Image: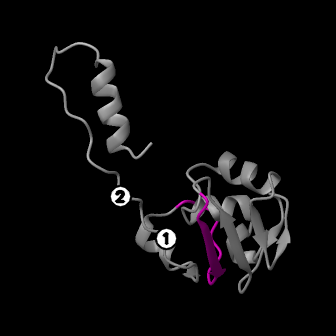
Amino acid sequence: MVENDAASGNVRLDAWIWSVRLAKTRSQAADACKGGHVRVNGDKVKPAQAVKIGDQVRVRRSDGWERTVTVTKLISKRVGPPAAAECYTDESPPPPPREFAGPTAVRERGAGRPTKRERREVDRLRHR
């Protein structure tokens, strides 16, 4: 009888990151590991590194936000969001607030390109 990877405690890091939905695809998870954007217990790791229960995994996203999770359950197949949330404890700080985008200039449809005066008003609105 062949043992399942998750049952034997031998799950690749990139597969686990993809399974718990910290990355959209497994190749993105592997690229993040290769690029040094993933750390396990503070160390940079390769995609094939085995992950264990109790490991602290830090994944830095492209928008600058960093997710820090502790592994509580090993899985190797992608599951739905509620089941994925049971596989780790999230210790990351809340995401930074989105910057308020000021008012946008509204032009009537078909009015053509903005004039120099209108461009200056738009720049003034954008605080340039």
What segment carries the magenta color? 64-78
- Disc 2 marks which residue? 100
Mark 2: which secondary structure? loop
Amino acid on which the number 2 mark rests in the picture:
Phe
Residue ID at (32%, 35%): 122
- Disc 1 marks which residue? 95
- Asked if the magenta segment contains residue 70, the reply would be yes
Mark 1: which secondary structure? loop
Camera sees residue 11: no
Name which quarter of the figure residue 126 lies in: top left
The residue nearer to you, when weighing 118 against 30, is 118
Camera sees residue 108: yes
Q: Position of residue 106 (x, y in %)?
A: 20, 33
User: Is 33 displayed left or right of 108 in the figure?
Assistant: right
- Asked if the magenta segment contains residue 96, the reply would be no
Name which quarter of the figure residue 20 lies in: bottom right
